Amino acid sequence: MTSEKKIGYLPRYRRCFICGDREVNPFSMSIRFYWDGEKIDTVIRPHDFYMGFDKIVHGGIQTAMMDEAMGWAITMEIGTFVLTRKLSVEFLRPMRTGKEYRLVARAIEHERKFSYAEGRIINTVNNKTIAEAEGTFFHMKKEQAQKVNDYLVYSPGDLNCLF
């Protein structure tokens, strides 16, 4: 880990379902992840496209958002990208389309080949947790991570993820 506190937005993979660019992938949620120096903390407003039933965001979509956020939280702490090994999700309340939420994730622990993280989706109106997740992630080797990094689009001011 580094002692330097980096704060700011993260790059995007333009085709990504979660953080992509809608001009390249019209189905992307186009989430911009923000690293506050300790965790991912991003505001989201899911569109009706991501509904499972009656304006409730599909559980798989909620899982994907938390998975992505947890992966980024680990990446920002260890300086290399990760791949999901295992996820556990608990849905506590319905997540409604068109409403504003916070997507928060933080790394919990790092081992030689794995890291652990937790994520949650929080209602911005009443501060109640909608869903929470825990995950285990494989560390990518530096060479693999560099190849992933080469595909990312860095907007001016975006944080460099690798070190």
Image (tube, helix red, strand yellow):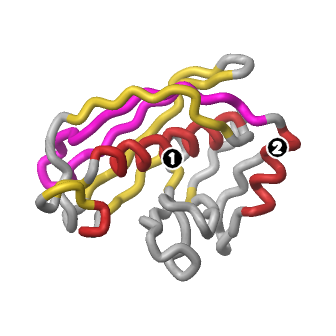
Establish if 62 lies above or below 26.
above
Q: Locate residue 62, reporting x and y percent.
A: 34, 47
Question: At 69% across and 34% down in the image, what residue appears?
Answer: 78
Query: Which is more N-terminal, label 1 or label 2?
Result: 1
Q: Quarter of the image containing the C terminus?
A: top right
Question: At 15% across and 46% down in the image, what residue appears?
Answer: 94
Tell whether 110 sits left or right of 141: left
Crowding at label 1, few (<14), some or many (≥20) Cα neighbours within 10 Å? some
Q: Which residue is mark 1?
A: 68
Q: Amino acid at mark 2?
A: Gln
Q: Amino acid at mark 1?
A: Glu
Nearer to us in this view, 8 or 132: 132
- Give the magenta-colored segment's residue range: 117-140
Whether residue 83 appears in magenta in the rendering, the answer is no
**Residue lying farthest to the right in this orientation:** 143
Quadrant in which residue 160 is drawn? bottom right
Nearer to us in this view, 42 or 82: 82
Nearer to us in this view, 78 or 83: 83
- Find out whether the residues at labels 2 and 1 contact each other: C-beta distance under 8 Å: no
Question: At 23% across and 35% down in the image, what residue appears?
Answer: 91
**Disc 1 secondary structure class:** helix
Question: At 73% across and 40% down in the image, what residue appears?
Answer: 79
Quadrant in which residue 150 is drawn? bottom right
Spatial CA distance of label 2 from label 1 is: 18 Å
Q: Main secondary structure of the magenta part?
A: strand
Residue 144, label in figure: 2
